[in-house]
Image: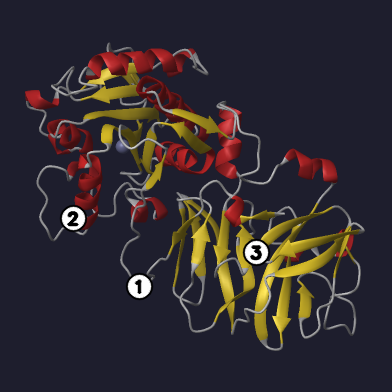
Amino acid sequence: MTALSGLLLAYLVSPALAAPGLDFTLHTQGPSANGALLVVAGIQGDEPGGFNAAALLVTRYRITRGKLWVVPNLNFTSIIKRSRGIHGDMNRKFAALPSDDPEYGAIERIKRIILAPDVDLVLNLHDGSGFYRPVHQDRHHSPRRWGQCIVIDQARFNAPSYGDLGGIAGLVADRVNTQLYREEHKYHVKNTRTPEGNSEMAKTLTWFAVKNGKAAFGLEASKTLPTHLRAYYHLAAIEAYMALMGIEFRRSFDLTPAGVKQAINDDIRLALYENKILLDVARARKHLRYVPLKKGASIDFEASNPLLAVTGNGKSYRVSYGNRRMTYLHPQYFEYDDSIDKVLLHIDGKAVEASLGTVVPVKESFIVEPVAGYRVNVIGWRQDGRRDESGVPVLGRDLIRRFSIDRDGRMYRVEFYRGPRFAGMLLVNIGPAEELAATPPAGNGALDG
Ligand SMILES: [Zn+2]
């Protein structure tokens, strides 16, 4: 059984649905009081390598020494809208900005975070075009390109620590270059020489940081690469910075292209109304219908991942995960009943107590133990003349596949009602035992690193 509360870091998002934008989130981790590494991603909404890497830092890394701060979704609204910037390029707003700019508030907030005394070093994650090379090779491999490099504004500056920007960037590039998937992906250091009159770069986040005495670097992965491979290189570079700063961690996946891909695709879960409902949307069908939402209240959810957003108007809601649109929720509205949070099931012949808002693995069959006063509805299962579906064996193979919430036809809703009121839901995940064992629940997976 996996509850959302079992995830490494669940956090609460209460979207004000009438508001024009989604606020970015700051996630802090680590025992130490100072010397934080600040990782910022999603300043441009169409660079998923960067923001997926940063989200994994939040959900899949546990800091055991030092301190890590992560803003994975700086331009959250543009990320959800799959736009570079719905209000222009946010990375040109760090010099002068009129106070009526729609992003003025967000820029002021991230500036304060960068300037926080705790922060020692700042990384701004990007996905850039082609492959940066110091010397022109061809159109896609040239000094004009941005992919696969560490960007610095100047070689060194006066700072108590980490002032040797060029030297540090060189060490990080060297370390990433020991982890290349292909020789073409080689990292270099790109110096934009910002203080020598580069007026465009003078408007960026990194220059704002350096100007204010904070070491800062742009990390660029190539847009030529698939998202998970970009995220892989970003994480390789970030781990090199962590090593340099003495930050230690455990990570719950293998830092390989395949490991990163799986981590990005797994465990995308929404808990609604304090765990009354858990929806695993990682492989959800495009539309989920008759979702029992709370009458007269705005949708209230907790997300397993900082790139998850729920937007909509009450008639239907879109669930987005970064640039991806995972599913649409079509609600049916109910009064809620709060009288139970646990139920008893017999799963493959074994009695199991399950909390509402969890996923329960089932091999072949289950029986929901009847509770007086409550009615059970297994969505996708029917027996003529029966209104309450507790107390009878439900065989996995009898469930009607089109009612599953996932495209694979494995995950089904079991809903509890007390009279006309909705009392909660859990999911049963039908599958062979060995497959279930191969995908450990989020947060309980073996940590390595
Ligand atoms: Zn960018």
> Is mark 1 in CB contact (under 8 Å) with mark 2?
no
Q: Is residue 426 above or below residue 385?
A: above
Q: Is residue 72 visible?
A: no
Identify the secondary structure beneath mark 1: loop
Neighbourhood count class around disc 3 (C-alpha, 10 Å): few under 14, some 14–19, many 20 upward: many
**For residue 336, which numbered disc appears in the image?**
none
Q: Which mark is residue 18?
A: 1
Scheme by which the image is coloured? secondary structure
Q: Of tags 3 and 2, which is closer to the observer?
A: 3
Q: Check the image and report above or below for 39 versus 180.
A: below
Of labels 1 and 2, earlier in sequence is: 1
Instruction: Give the residue at mark 3.
Output: 357
Q: Nearer the viewer, residue 171 or 397?
A: 171
x, y percentage for residue 261? 57, 35
**Residue sitting at the far bottom:** 419
Q: CA distance from mark 1 to mark 2?
A: 19 Å
- Element assignment for label 2: helix
Which amino acid type corresponds to the residue marked 2 in the rendered image? Tyr
Q: Quadrant of ligand 1?
A: top left
Q: Which residue is mark 2?
A: 104
Task: Residue 342: name its quadrant.
Answer: bottom right
Q: Is mark 1 within 8 Å of ligand 1?
A: no
